[in-house]
Amino acid sequence: MQRYFVNKKVDNTFQLDEKDSHHVLNVMRMKKEENIEVIYNEEVYLTKIVDFNPVILVIIRKIERTVNETKIPKVTICQSLVSENKMDLILQKGTELGAYSFISLKTVNSIIKGNDKDFNKKITRWERIVYDASRQSKRNNVPIIEKVMDINELIKHPYDLKILCTVNEMSTSLKNVLQNNKNYDTMIIVVGPEGGFTNKEEELLIQNGFISTSLGNLVLRTETTALAVLSMINYEFER
Protein backbone atom coordinates (compact mmCIF):
# COMPACT_ATOMS: atom_id res chain seq x y z
CA MET A 1 0.00 0.00 0.00
CA GLN A 2 1.27 3.46 -0.88
CA ARG A 3 2.32 5.73 1.99
CA TYR A 4 2.46 9.55 2.14
CA PHE A 5 3.32 12.15 4.78
CA VAL A 6 1.03 15.06 5.65
CA ASN A 7 1.51 18.06 7.93
CA LYS A 8 -2.06 19.21 8.55
CA LYS A 9 -5.24 17.57 9.74
CA VAL A 10 -8.59 19.35 9.56
CA ASP A 11 -11.44 17.55 11.31
CA ASN A 12 -11.34 14.09 9.74
CA THR A 13 -9.49 14.95 6.54
CA PHE A 14 -5.94 15.15 5.29
CA GLN A 15 -4.74 16.88 2.14
CA LEU A 16 -1.70 15.75 0.17
CA ASP A 17 0.74 18.27 -1.24
CA GLU A 18 0.97 18.95 -4.97
CA LYS A 19 3.78 16.49 -5.69
CA ASP A 20 2.17 13.62 -3.82
CA SER A 21 -1.19 14.37 -5.42
CA HIS A 22 0.53 14.13 -8.81
CA HIS A 23 2.05 10.81 -7.78
CA VAL A 24 -1.32 9.40 -6.70
CA LEU A 25 -3.15 10.61 -9.80
CA ASN A 26 -0.67 10.33 -12.63
CA VAL A 27 1.92 7.79 -11.52
CA MET A 28 -0.08 5.31 -9.46
CA ARG A 29 -3.33 6.11 -11.34
CA MET A 30 -5.40 5.51 -8.25
CA LYS A 31 -9.18 5.88 -8.14
CA LYS A 32 -11.70 7.18 -5.63
CA GLU A 33 -12.39 4.86 -2.70
CA GLU A 34 -8.90 3.31 -2.95
CA ASN A 35 -6.94 3.11 0.30
CA ILE A 36 -3.56 4.59 1.10
CA GLU A 37 -1.57 5.04 4.30
CA VAL A 38 -0.97 8.52 5.68
CA ILE A 39 1.63 9.48 8.28
CA TYR A 40 0.70 12.37 10.54
CA ASN A 41 2.78 13.22 13.62
CA GLU A 42 4.62 9.89 13.17
CA GLU A 43 1.35 7.93 13.45
CA VAL A 44 -0.08 5.76 10.69
CA TYR A 45 -3.62 6.23 9.36
CA LEU A 46 -5.45 4.08 6.87
CA THR A 47 -7.40 6.40 4.59
CA LYS A 48 -9.41 6.39 1.40
CA ILE A 49 -9.47 8.87 -1.46
CA VAL A 50 -12.72 10.81 -1.64
CA ASP A 51 -11.86 13.79 -3.83
CA PHE A 52 -9.27 14.51 -6.51
CA ASN A 53 -9.30 18.29 -6.64
CA PRO A 54 -7.07 18.42 -4.70
CA VAL A 55 -6.63 14.94 -3.26
CA ILE A 56 -8.54 14.79 0.02
CA LEU A 57 -8.40 11.81 2.34
CA VAL A 58 -10.94 10.73 4.93
CA ILE A 59 -9.68 8.86 7.95
CA ILE A 60 -11.04 5.33 8.24
CA ARG A 61 -9.04 4.20 11.26
CA LYS A 62 -5.65 4.52 12.85
CA ILE A 63 -3.43 1.51 12.27
CA GLU A 64 -2.15 -0.01 15.48
CA ARG A 65 1.55 -0.80 15.32
CA THR A 66 3.49 -3.13 17.60
CA VAL A 67 5.89 -1.01 19.60
CA ASN A 68 9.52 -2.12 19.40
CA GLU A 69 10.70 -2.31 23.00
CA THR A 70 14.37 -2.14 21.94
CA LYS A 71 15.79 1.30 22.60
CA ILE A 72 17.29 2.62 19.36
CA PRO A 73 19.31 5.85 19.40
CA LYS A 74 18.66 8.68 16.99
CA VAL A 75 21.58 8.52 14.55
CA THR A 76 22.85 11.60 12.71
CA ILE A 77 25.05 11.04 9.67
CA CYS A 78 27.55 13.86 9.20
CA GLN A 79 28.90 13.39 5.69
CA SER A 80 31.70 15.49 4.26
CA LEU A 81 30.54 17.10 1.04
CA VAL A 82 30.80 14.73 -1.91
CA SER A 83 29.59 14.70 -5.51
CA GLU A 84 25.87 14.91 -6.20
CA ASN A 85 25.36 11.27 -7.16
CA LYS A 86 27.23 10.04 -4.07
CA MET A 87 25.27 12.33 -1.77
CA ASP A 88 22.02 11.15 -3.34
CA LEU A 89 23.01 7.55 -2.60
CA ILE A 90 23.96 8.30 1.01
CA LEU A 91 20.70 10.16 1.65
CA GLN A 92 18.47 7.57 0.01
CA LYS A 93 20.06 4.45 1.49
CA GLY A 94 20.80 6.13 4.81
CA THR A 95 17.11 6.95 5.12
CA GLU A 96 16.17 3.35 4.34
CA LEU A 97 18.60 2.21 7.05
CA GLY A 98 17.03 4.45 9.68
CA ALA A 99 19.15 7.61 9.94
CA TYR A 100 17.40 10.27 12.02
CA SER A 101 19.11 13.28 10.42
CA PHE A 102 21.88 14.30 8.02
CA ILE A 103 24.54 17.00 8.17
CA SER A 104 26.76 17.94 5.23
CA LEU A 105 30.22 18.99 6.35
CA LYS A 106 32.63 21.43 4.70
CA THR A 107 36.21 20.16 5.06
CA VAL A 108 39.61 21.07 3.64
CA ASN A 109 39.57 18.14 1.21
CA SER A 110 35.90 18.36 0.20
CA ILE A 111 35.58 18.21 -3.56
CA ILE A 112 32.32 20.16 -3.54
CA LYS A 113 32.55 23.86 -2.72
CA GLY A 114 29.83 26.48 -2.70
CA ASN A 115 28.10 29.32 -0.92
CA ASP A 116 24.94 29.43 1.19
CA LYS A 117 22.75 30.06 -1.87
CA ASP A 118 24.13 26.97 -3.60
CA PHE A 119 23.69 24.85 -0.48
CA ASN A 120 20.11 26.04 0.11
CA LYS A 121 19.17 24.77 -3.36
CA LYS A 122 20.83 21.45 -2.59
CA ILE A 123 19.02 21.15 0.74
CA THR A 124 15.63 21.55 -0.97
CA ARG A 125 16.54 18.72 -3.32
CA TRP A 126 17.94 16.57 -0.50
CA GLU A 127 14.73 17.00 1.50
CA ARG A 128 12.76 15.53 -1.38
CA ILE A 129 15.14 12.58 -1.65
CA VAL A 130 14.76 11.63 2.02
CA TYR A 131 11.00 12.18 1.82
CA ASP A 132 10.64 9.78 -1.11
CA ALA A 133 12.93 7.24 0.57
CA SER A 134 10.94 7.47 3.81
CA ARG A 135 7.71 6.85 1.96
CA GLN A 136 9.17 3.92 0.03
CA SER A 137 10.68 2.27 3.13
CA LYS A 138 7.50 2.82 5.18
CA ARG A 139 9.08 4.91 7.89
CA ASN A 140 6.90 6.85 10.30
CA ASN A 141 9.08 9.95 10.04
CA VAL A 142 11.29 11.81 7.58
CA PRO A 143 14.96 12.48 8.39
CA ILE A 144 15.95 16.07 9.14
CA ILE A 145 18.34 17.77 6.73
CA GLU A 146 20.45 20.14 8.79
CA LYS A 147 22.24 23.16 7.35
CA VAL A 148 25.69 22.69 5.82
CA MET A 149 28.34 23.18 8.53
CA ASP A 150 32.07 23.44 9.01
CA ILE A 151 33.89 21.60 11.78
CA ASN A 152 33.92 24.61 14.12
CA GLU A 153 30.11 24.70 13.93
CA LEU A 154 29.77 20.94 14.24
CA ILE A 155 31.69 20.60 17.51
CA LYS A 156 29.22 22.94 19.24
CA HIS A 157 26.35 20.49 18.76
CA PRO A 158 25.71 18.10 21.68
CA TYR A 159 25.38 14.34 21.13
CA ASP A 160 25.51 11.50 23.64
CA LEU A 161 27.92 9.48 21.50
CA LYS A 162 30.21 10.99 18.87
CA ILE A 163 31.99 8.70 16.40
CA LEU A 164 34.70 9.77 13.96
CA CYS A 165 35.25 7.19 11.22
CA THR A 166 38.95 6.88 10.44
CA VAL A 167 41.54 4.52 8.96
CA ASN A 168 43.91 5.17 11.83
CA GLU A 169 45.22 1.77 12.95
CA MET A 170 45.25 2.89 16.60
CA SER A 171 41.51 3.60 16.57
CA THR A 172 38.94 1.69 18.59
CA SER A 173 36.78 -0.76 16.63
CA LEU A 174 33.18 0.25 16.01
CA LYS A 175 32.04 -3.00 17.61
CA ASN A 176 33.74 -2.10 20.88
CA VAL A 177 32.47 1.46 20.80
CA LEU A 178 28.85 0.33 20.35
CA GLN A 179 29.05 -2.46 22.92
CA ASN A 180 30.69 -0.26 25.55
CA ASN A 181 28.34 2.71 25.10
CA LYS A 182 24.76 1.52 25.53
CA ASN A 183 23.11 4.33 27.46
CA TYR A 184 22.62 7.07 24.92
CA ASP A 185 19.72 8.57 23.01
CA THR A 186 21.59 10.41 20.27
CA MET A 187 24.72 9.64 18.29
CA ILE A 188 26.55 11.19 15.38
CA ILE A 189 28.71 9.46 12.78
CA VAL A 190 31.26 11.72 11.05
CA VAL A 191 32.58 10.56 7.69
CA GLY A 192 35.45 12.25 5.87
CA PRO A 193 35.77 13.19 2.19
CA GLU A 194 37.55 11.17 -0.50
CA GLY A 195 40.87 12.72 0.49
CA GLY A 196 40.28 12.17 4.19
CA PHE A 197 40.40 14.62 7.07
CA THR A 198 43.55 16.61 7.68
CA ASN A 199 45.44 15.86 10.90
CA LYS A 200 44.31 19.21 12.27
CA GLU A 201 40.65 18.42 11.56
CA GLU A 202 40.88 14.99 13.21
CA GLU A 203 42.65 16.45 16.24
CA LEU A 204 39.97 19.12 16.65
CA LEU A 205 37.17 16.53 16.52
CA ILE A 206 38.91 14.21 18.99
CA GLN A 207 39.60 17.11 21.37
CA ASN A 208 35.84 17.76 21.37
CA GLY A 209 34.74 14.28 22.35
CA PHE A 210 34.65 12.39 19.06
CA ILE A 211 35.90 8.81 19.36
CA SER A 212 38.37 7.80 16.66
CA THR A 213 36.75 4.64 15.33
CA SER A 214 37.80 1.94 12.89
CA LEU A 215 35.45 -0.15 10.73
CA GLY A 216 38.02 -2.91 10.23
CA ASN A 217 40.92 -3.69 7.92
CA LEU A 218 39.15 -2.75 4.69
CA VAL A 219 39.28 0.85 3.45
CA LEU A 220 35.77 1.86 2.41
CA ARG A 221 34.77 4.58 -0.02
CA THR A 222 33.28 7.63 1.64
CA GLU A 223 29.80 6.86 0.24
CA THR A 224 29.98 3.32 1.64
CA THR A 225 31.13 4.19 5.15
CA ALA A 226 27.95 5.74 6.57
CA LEU A 227 25.82 2.95 5.15
CA ALA A 228 28.10 0.30 6.63
CA VAL A 229 27.94 1.99 10.06
CA LEU A 230 24.14 2.23 9.95
CA SER A 231 23.92 -1.46 9.06
CA MET A 232 26.15 -2.33 12.03
CA ILE A 233 24.05 -0.19 14.35
CA ASN A 234 20.85 -1.84 13.11
CA TYR A 235 22.38 -5.25 13.78
CA GLU A 236 23.60 -4.26 17.24
CA PHE A 237 20.18 -2.93 18.25
CA GLU A 238 18.14 -5.44 16.22
CA ARG A 239 16.19 -2.67 14.52
Image (spheres, helix red, strand yellow):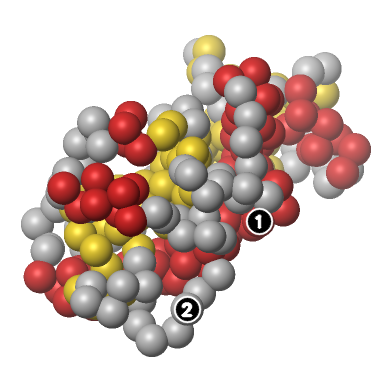
In three-dimensional space, the C-alpha distance between marks 2 and 1, rounded to whole angstroms, equals 17 Å
| Residue 104 or residue 50, whichever sits in front | 104
* 213 w.r.t. 164: above or below: below
Dot 1 falls on a residue whose secondary structure is helix
Residue farthest toward the bottom in the current orientation of the protein: 217
Task: Tell me if label 2 and label 1 are in contact, CB under 8 Å.
Answer: no
* 16 w.r.t. 197: above or below: above
What is the three-letter code of the residue carrying label 2? Val
Dot 2 falls on a residue whose secondary structure is loop
Badge 1: how crowded within 10 Å, few (<14), some, or many (20+)?
Answer: some
Q: Residue at x 24, y 52 (%)?
A: 203
Query: Mark 2 against mark 1, which lies toward the viewer?
Result: 2
User: Residue 3: percent from the left, percent from the top?
Assistant: 62, 45
Q: Report the number of discs.
A: 2
User: Residue 36: percent from the left, percent from the top?
Assistant: 65, 43
| Residue 223 or residue 102, whichever sits in front | 223
Q: Residue at x 83, y 42 (%)?
A: 30
- Chain-order first, disc 2 or disc 1: 1
User: Residue 29: percent from the left, percent from the top?
Assistant: 88, 43
| Residue 108 or residue 93, whichever sits in front | 108
Q: Residue 143 got which mark?
A: none
Q: Quadrant of residue 32?
A: top right
Q: Residue at x 51, y 18 (%)?
A: 9
Quickly name the residue at label 2: 219
* 58 w.r.t. 42: above or below: above
| Residue 238 or residue 116, whichever sits in front | 116
User: Residue 174: percent from the left, percent from the top?
Assistant: 26, 73
Q: Residue at x 33, y 48 (%)?
A: 201
Quickly name the residue at label 1: 86
